[in-house]
Image (cartoon, coloured by chain):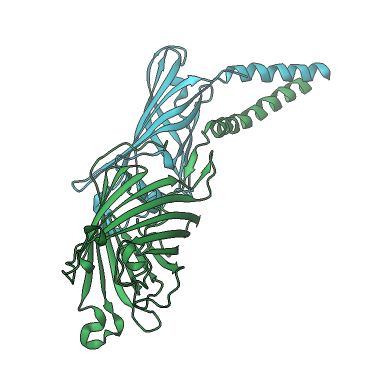
Amino acid sequence: MRRLSVTILLSLMTLGIFAQEDLMNIVNQSTPNEINYTTATFKSTRVMNGHSIERMQTGQLDVRISHRFETLNSGGYNFFGLDISYIHLGLEYGITNWLMIGVGRTEIDKTFDGFAKFSILRQSTGAKEMPVSVSAVTSVALKTLKFPDQNPTNYFTSRLAYVAQILVARKISEGFSVQLTPSYVHRNLVATELDPNDIFALGAGARLKLSKRVSLNGEYYYIANPKTYLSQQVYNPLSVGFDIETGGHVFQLFFTNSRGAIEKQFIGETTGSWKKGDIHFGFNISRVFTLKKHLKSSNY
Amino acid sequence: MKRLFLLAFFLNIVFAVNGQKYMTKNGFIGFYSHTPMEDIKADNNQVVGVLDISTGEMVFQALIKSFHFDRALMEEHFNENYMESEKFPKSLFKGKITNLASVDFSKTGTYDVTVEGDLTIRDVTNKISTKGTIEVVNGGINANSKFNIVPEDYKITIPGVVRDKFDKSMAVTVTMKYTPIANK
């Protein structure tokens, strides 16, 4: 009789322990295995000068104001370059979750530019594994500066330049991301016969998060075309600086050897050299506005 | 000896059948904060919840990335800066109905209950106690509750610059529509 009661008691006790564990097991088995898309590979749609794989979501407008000052080696009289600045203004908008467009204007050569950025692949873990995010950018730049020589017939098409880029990025860890950007620039009209109309370059960018809202970014474009026998000496653009995010703004503060803020200008028209001290302080201010509110679904 | 084992075995089965469990994979948890500066509102419709009516025990688990906002930028900041959802992907509640005896699960109707348990967000666990209602309907059980949580209690840091955009505490609403789990 005693053995019976002990057995019953033991059975009931083990049942009690299993109850809570049982509930947790049911919950864990039922939690859906979703696709976990990587977010915030970079804090903004630009690494520094060049595009990053980040995009504007549907209905989001990015107002961008960029300054590139003159070179630090202009001396104290010119306040180390801060006296003169080249401005780029841009408006960028997310049409769908995978397509973003932008228009802008640069002071240099009075250039208007427009671009479209397509998000092709997104890095993800979970139900679907994708090691990298891939995007494509195509842009057009229109120089509106009056032709210096009115004698020969000047064509409208001479003002145009085109850029095509593929962006491949990976968020390696929460704090570190890298991106490779093979780029092609085509300029319809160049200064002399010696200058190439087609430029091939490979860009590399990286960002290291220093805190939740501040990161250290670097960007370098290696231009594959020979740099000898050109009408003017060009250098590979290199930029290093910080991204600071505060609520709806992202401030990008950096040093670069390029005066231009658009691809056509900094890839192939950078005439400054870091070694010679042709270093410009520059910044981008990005402010995002949500024009269209939407319930973003977890399915892409 | 064999008869004793057989008896213990059958007793286990009898008790297992009586431990009726209910579950949902689309439970709702939403939170809301209102200030003159800004309204913050998010919905999660993919909460997994289990309720054992014989013991009054309940467990729910919500994936942080399944909380959706109407502004994509707000959702990104929520995950990246405030919740760090890569580090802490889930939030969990494990608790029980303290006045289980006052609920008759076999009769349809609405019953007021008090639920106590542990709420874990960002690996920080706090005991919470809240009032709610259990509604027994045909084919299921609906559970509702509203309570407040203070972000700082879960080590969610809100910078001083933007503190005025958030209310002191977030109003959380839980609505679970349970259906019975078929016994194995």
Is residue B156 visible to us here?
Answer: no
Residue closest to the eye, B83 or A149: A149
Which chain appears green?
A
Q: Residue at x 43, y 75 (%)?
A: A227
Q: Where A218 falls versus B43 (above or below)?
A: below
- Chain in cyan (letter): B
Q: How many numbered dots are placed on residues in this image?
A: 0
- Quarter of the figure that contains the C terminus of chain A: top left
- Tell me the quarter of the picture where residue B132 sits: top left
A92 and A13: which one is in front?
A: A92
Rendered location of residue B8, percent (x, y): 73, 20
Q: Residue at x 40, y 64 (%)?
A: A199
Relative to B171, is B178 on the left or the right?
Answer: right
Which of the 4 quarters of the picture holds residue A114?
bottom left
Furthest residue in direction front, as rendered? A152
Residue shown at the point (26%, 61%) measured from the top left? A158
Q: Nearer the viewer, residue A123 or A208?
A: A123
Q: In screen coordinates, is B17 left or right of A68?
A: right
